[in-house]
Structure formats: structure tokens, C-alpha cells
Image (cartoon, helix red, strand yellow):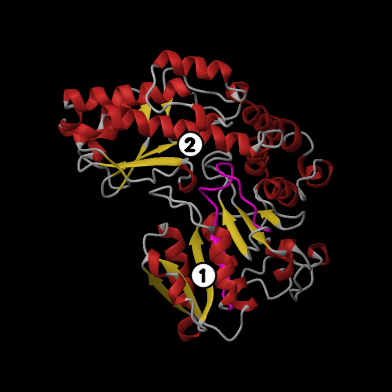
Amino acid sequence: MTMSSVLPMVVSRQELEQRDQDDPLRGLREAFDMPPDLLYMDGNSLGVLPHRARQRAQEVISDEWGLKLIDSWVENDWLQAPARVGDKIGALIGAKVGEVLVADSTSVNLFKMLAAALQANTGRHVILSESGNFPTDLYIMQGLSAFAGDKVCQQIVEPDQVIEHLSDQVAVLLLTQVHYKTGQIRDMKEITRLAHEAGVLVVWDLSHSTGSIPVNVNDCEVDFAVGCGYKFLNGGPGAPAYLFVAERHQNSGWPILSGWLGHRDPFGFSDQYSPAADINRFQCGTPSVIAIAILECGVDLFTSTDMVALRDKAIALSSVFIGLMDARCMQFGIKLVSSRNAADRGGHVSFSHPNGYGIMQAAKQRGVIGDFRAPDIMRFGITPLYQRFQDIFDVVDIIHEVMTMGEWDKQEYNVQPAWS
């Protein structure tokens, strides 16, 4: 019987402290530099610093770069880092060796994957996606369409209309598996199957999936995927992203960003580009060595951790959170946005309130770090690697106090900066 199936939703703090003591994953928290007196519920936006990352960065800077300088490209395996760490991420998402590469940003990788999918599915010209998808996904799609002129066009439809728009003009469908606002999980296997039946290839954004929920891209027959390194993988702010290209598609087109390291023989220094015959053709510029080294520390924390056990704990944490919010905070007009069905809910829980921004700012002053998404979404990350059950109780307790005292109504909590 799983943890989530036996844990009551409304419990005391003492009961949750005991649950933490009985948690077989409790030791993982010690791997992170957790700020004292902070209730961190934003690991779905930026993961916490692993202790090993600080040490590893110092090693790369002082020893590898500082002492060995350019020799470290070979002696310390810098050149192979994108593929090496890519394979480690690949193991988390059900990919084969040689199907995942760490490179660039999520946005750049989206551009590369959409272009690759268009080349692999000639005779069609439409990129299809859903309204409300993460903005960068839609923006990259729109930018590629604008650049290609009448050769490519973009189509954005309502989420429940995606399947009915899989026409013979659609080359590629772009979707996010876990929605960035609601946490809703898309059925990746079924949607990919339906797309393939219509002759459409699929690019999946796994930014809110990898390290949060079990993923198996090959079992789902996924064509292309991208994801970021700074959320659940704890790779640090602006960490390198990754891309997945199924082996069957790796030689189906000319890389749209045909950079030096994607060449078949980069050190042959030819004037003419000839793409590598494997995943490396999707490399572009020189990899960010220090950033990849830090990302690897976060990824390594998953190598000996069962993703099913992590997912089970995450479901239990989020279910307790929803139960406590129902009991203590819903009378203040706070509404659950995420699904009540745990199987449909990813690594964050979202609520709405007309004064959501002020509520989050008031809670922040009391040590609760979540995030706000316009127009009214309060989002709380569920990160079982380092989150405790007692933390959930304390977060709800503080939100209840904020609402009871009307703290959210202070003027300074309701002036949003331009970037929020």
C-alpha cells in the first residue's frame, strides 16, 4: 500500500512530524543547502542548491580551469559533458543512450526540435499548439513561422480542440506534458498515438515533468522533447537545458542551427558543414562547462532514487496540502485550480484568488516562498527530494493567518513589479 493511499488529508502537525520520521526518503533532504526558517514551495521554478554543486563548481573553477586550463577539455572530459549528462537525464525519462543531449536553453532547443520535426515530416507546413501553453513555446513557434514566411504557419487552438485539429496539413504538434499553471498532466502516450495516426510528429516540453513525475518517452513513442535543468533537476538558475531526439529521427534533416560542435568532424575545420550522424548534430556552440558540471550534481541525486517512490511521496504531500487548504482556507474565497485527481496532478498545486498576488507577498514576509502567475494563480511546488510533511502544515497555517488578519490587503503587497 502506498504512502498516499493511507495518509489522511486533514491531520495535525504532530502526525505529520511522525510521517516525516517514517519517510524512507527523508535522508535526501540532507543533500541540499536548505535556508533556515524558510518554507520553500517554489522548486518547480528554481530548485534548491545541492551541497555537492558548490563543491563541484569550486573544483571546476580552481582545479580544472585554474590549473589545467585548456587541457581539461580532454583530461576532465569537458567535451563529452553534454552527452554524458544527457544520458543521465535520458535514464530519468526512458530514453536510450545517445538520445538526450544537454545544450543551450529550452527556448533554443524548442527552435531546433520544431525545425527538425518539420524536416522529418515534409509535405506539411502547420505547427499546432494549444492556447495557454507556456509562453516561450508559443513565441518560438510564432517566431519560426514568421521567419519561414508562407512555408510554415502556426495554429493555436483551445486545449480541448487539439486532437480534432490533427489534419493532413499539420507537420508537428507542440505540447507541454505538465501545464505550468494548473499542473494538469497530459496523456503523453495517448496523444502521441493519435498524432501519429494522423501522420503528425510531436514535440513535448518536459520542463515541469522531468524529476517530478515518471516519464518514459520511448514507451510513449515520443519523437522529440525538450526540458530545462533548473526546476526539479536542481541545476541552478539558468542551468543548461536538454533535448531528446528519438534515434529514428536523428538523421532525418539538416540541423537548423548548424554549429561547429554539431559537425561530423569539428576538428577537421572544413569550410563546409557536414552534420554528425548521431545526437551530437544538435550541438551548436561551445558547451557551458561550469553550468553543466553544476547541473550534473542535481541530476546525480536521482540516480539512486526510485522515481515511483518520489512520485508517491509527492502525491501524498500535495494531497495533504489540498486537504488542509480545504479545511482552513477555502472560506476566504481561495479556489483550487489543480486537479483533485492525484493521477492528473503534476509537481505543483495551484489555487486562485482575486488578490492572489497580495496573498503571496504577505506569505513571503512570513517565510513562505511560492509564486504568482497572472492573473490570479498562486502556485506551490511539490518537491519530495527535500520537502517535509510538516512544512506543508506550516505553509497552510501561515496562509490561514494571512487571510484571517487581512495582511494581503497592505498597499505594499499589491504593487506588482514590471517583471512579475
Q: Quick check: 17 above or below 387? A: above
- Per the image, the residue denoted by label 1 is 173
Please report the residue visible at 47 percent of the width from the left and 35 percent of the height from the top. 382
Left or right of residue 254: residue 277: right
Q: Kindly state the secondary structure of the residue where label 1 is placed.
A: strand
Q: Where residue 170 appears, x then y in whole percent? A: 51, 79
Q: Which residues are magenta?
A: 199-218
Q: Where residue 90 appears, x then y in whole percent? A: 69, 50
State yes or no: residue 287 in magenta: no
Q: Amino acid at mark 2?
A: Gly
Q: Where residue 187 appears, x then y in whole percent? A: 52, 57
Mark 1 vs mark 2: in front: 1
Left or right of residue 356: residue 410: left
Q: Where residue 268 appears, x then y in whole percent? A: 83, 66
Q: Kindly state the secondary structure of the residue where label 2 is placed.
A: loop
Quadrant, the C terminus: top left
Within 10 Å of the Cα at label 2, are there few (<14), some (14-19), or many (20+) other Cα atoms? many
- Per the image, the residue denoted by label 2 is 43
Within 10 Å of the Cα at label 1, are there few (<14), some (14-19), or many (20+) other Cα atoms? many
Q: Say which label, 1 or 2, has the lower sequence index.
A: 2
- Viewer-closest of 163 and 5: 5
Q: Quadrant of residue 359?
A: top left
Asked whether residue 109 is in view, the answer is: no
Q: Quick check: 255 above or below 11? A: below
- Viewer-closest of 147 and 205: 205
Please report the residue visible at 47 percent of the width from the left and 26 percent of the height from the top. 7
State yes or no: residue 203 in magenta: yes
Quadrant, the N terminus: top right
Q: Amino acid at mark 1?
A: Leu
Specify the principal SS of the magenta part. loop
